[in-house]
């Protein structure tokens, strides 16, 4: 192992012996005068004439992992080990439990960690497509129609998948404990808002508990719970909190704001900071940023994607998505197929913003994307995408059309405002 590697951890799994070995290798690099090793030290320790010791190298390792000190790193590793041991012996069998997650990404890891309760994947991606404050049966049918069209699914399959998720919410009386596993991004938090809204309506007798995460010690760029190792899920388990009446009420308020046909309620809710669920306010703000920019007509995801291509040159679509998730997106929330769905309108119409060298027979991840001259003009604000009448798109309950007044986001003020159609 090279002493030049900072070895960022993505799954939260930290091994104390491994970290000790890294510290020894770093000290060896320091003593050998390796520039990379010395550069790492200088990031965290004030230069001094005295020779550095192993404790200094351990401090650097701890800081690189996101901890204030080596004892804090060791304490965290010990707490994960203890939580893992307890969960493997106790599990969740004290109460009939349902785990709800907006995907299947942790289902196997929960089992590995020792949680054997039932699992519900409720994964309707409210962060894309139209939303309405309809009754649950109407909503699931509206969403099934959208998902079938967006992702080329058989209508019956899309409807069946929706019915499984929404239908399980009507059968909660069999459970004594319901645990919601969610992170901080808008994909998760919008679904959480709806679930809290429905749980407030349904009033199940079960204990309602929430695990909400926006960072994990030792993880340099935390994107979601699904990236975590099973033993880190064990560590999260005792951190769950009881869902409060204030959180249930906030879920309803957020859902009503998300489904409104103008952004006034959403903006007002964001301004409160949503103290009962602080992550929700941040996610709602990111959701609002999908409104088209007043100058160029692009939502933030589209704008960032074009900026990547302008910066890097032509790239396969999969690499654009990877760059977006790893570096450019301030609050990663999209899955890869959702990202591809969002790119396709940019490639259509009389004046596309993007083109590709490859045809339909090439997997979308491998299709190279090129920004057009019109794409450059839109990105710079000289042209506005809305003026080319792109296909209607939605930000929650807000319909965005180029052939009528559309709600846009003014970057200067940070506030939504109407933009008359075809403004020069």
Image (cartoon, rainbow, N blue to C red):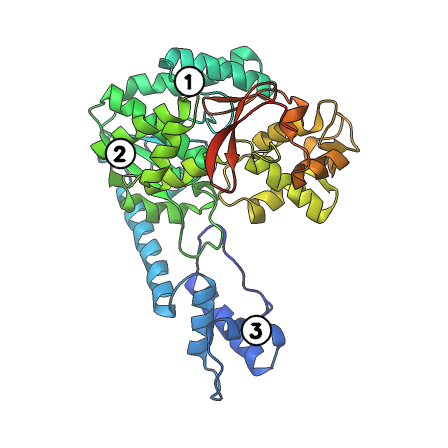
Q: Which of 413 and 236 is in front in this view?
A: 413
Q: How crowded is mark 1: few (under 14 residues within 10 Å), some or many (20 or more)?
A: some
> Can residue 209 be seen by looking at this rendering?
yes
Q: Nearer the viewer, residue 419 or 118?
A: 419
Name the residue that disc number 2 marks: 247
Numbered label attached to residue 383: none
Screen quadrant of the C terminus:
top right
**Residue 415 x, y percent position in the rendering:** 45, 36
Residue 346 versus residue 313 in the image, above or below:
above
Name the residue that disc number 3 marks: 39
**C-alpha span from label 1 to label 3:** 54 Å
**C-alpha span from label 2 to label 1:** 21 Å
Name the residue that disc number 1 marks: 132
Callout 2 secondary element: helix
Callout 1 secondary element: loop
Residue 144 versus residue 333 in the image, above or below:
above
Screen quadrant of the N terminus:
bottom right
**C-alpha span from label 3 to label 2:** 46 Å
Mark found first going from the N terminus, 2 or 1: 1
Mark found first going from the N terminus, 3 or 2: 3
Q: Nearer the viewer, residue 214 or 174?
A: 214
**Residue lying at the far right of the rendered structure:** 357
Callout 3 secondary element: helix
Marks 1, 3: nearer the viewer: 1
Q: Residue at x 41, y 11 (%)?
A: 138
**Residue 85 x, y percent position in the rendering:** 31, 51
Q: Residue at x 58, y 34 (%)?
A: 336
């Amino acid at each position: 192992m090279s002493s030049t590697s900072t070895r960022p951890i993505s799954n939260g799994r930290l091994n104390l012996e491994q970290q000790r070995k890294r510290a020894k290798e770093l000290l060896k690099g320091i003593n050998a005068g390796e520039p990379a090793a010395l550069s790492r030290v200088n990031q965290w320790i004030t230069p001094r004439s005295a020779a550095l010791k192993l404790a200094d190298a351990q401090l650097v390792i701890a800081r690189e992992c996101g901890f204030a000190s080596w004892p804090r790193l060791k304490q965290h590793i010990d707490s994960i080990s203890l939580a893992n041991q307890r969960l493997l012996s106790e599990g969740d069998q004290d109460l009939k439990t349902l785990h709800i997650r907006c995907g299947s990404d942790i289902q196997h890891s929960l089992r590995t960690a020792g949680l054997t309760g039932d699992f519900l994947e409720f994964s309707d991606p409210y962060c894309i497509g139209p939303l309405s404050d309809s009754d649950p049966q109407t909503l699931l049918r509206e969403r099934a129609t959208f998902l079938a069209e967006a992702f080329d699914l058989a209508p019956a399959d899309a409807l069946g998948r929706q019915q499984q998720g929404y239908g399980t919410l009507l059968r909660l009386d069999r459970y004594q404990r319901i645990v919601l596993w969610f992170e901080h991004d808008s994909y998760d938090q919008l679904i959480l808002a709806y679930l809290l809204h429905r749980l407030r309506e349904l009033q199940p007798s079960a204990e309602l508990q929430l695990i909400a995460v926006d960072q994990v010690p030792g993880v340099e760029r935390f994107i979601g719970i699904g990236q975590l190792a099973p033993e880190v899920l064990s560590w999260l388990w005792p951190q769950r909190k009881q869902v409060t009446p204030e959180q249930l009420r906030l879920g309803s308020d957020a859902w009503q704001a998300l489904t409104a046909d103008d952004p006034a309620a959403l903006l007002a809710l964001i301004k409160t900071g949503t103290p009962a669920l602080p992550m929700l306010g941040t996610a709602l703000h990111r959701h609002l940023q999908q409104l088209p920019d007043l100058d160029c007509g692009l939502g933030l995801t589209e704008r960032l994607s074009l900026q990547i291509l302008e910066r890097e040159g032509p790239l396969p679509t999969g690499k654009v998505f990877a760059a977006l998730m790893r570096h450019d997106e301030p609050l990663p929330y999209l899955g890869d197929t959702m990202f591809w769905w969002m790119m396709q309108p940019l490639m259509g119409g009389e004046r596309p913003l993007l083109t590709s060298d490859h045809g339909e027979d090439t997997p979308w991840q491998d299709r190279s994307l090129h920004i057009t001259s019109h794409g450059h003009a839109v990105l710079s604000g000289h042209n506005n995408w809305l003026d080319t009448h792109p296909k209607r798109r939605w930000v929650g309950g807000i319909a965005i059309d180029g052939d009528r007044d559309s709600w846009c986001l003014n970057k200067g003020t940070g506030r939504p405002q109407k933009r008359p159609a075809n403004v020069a």
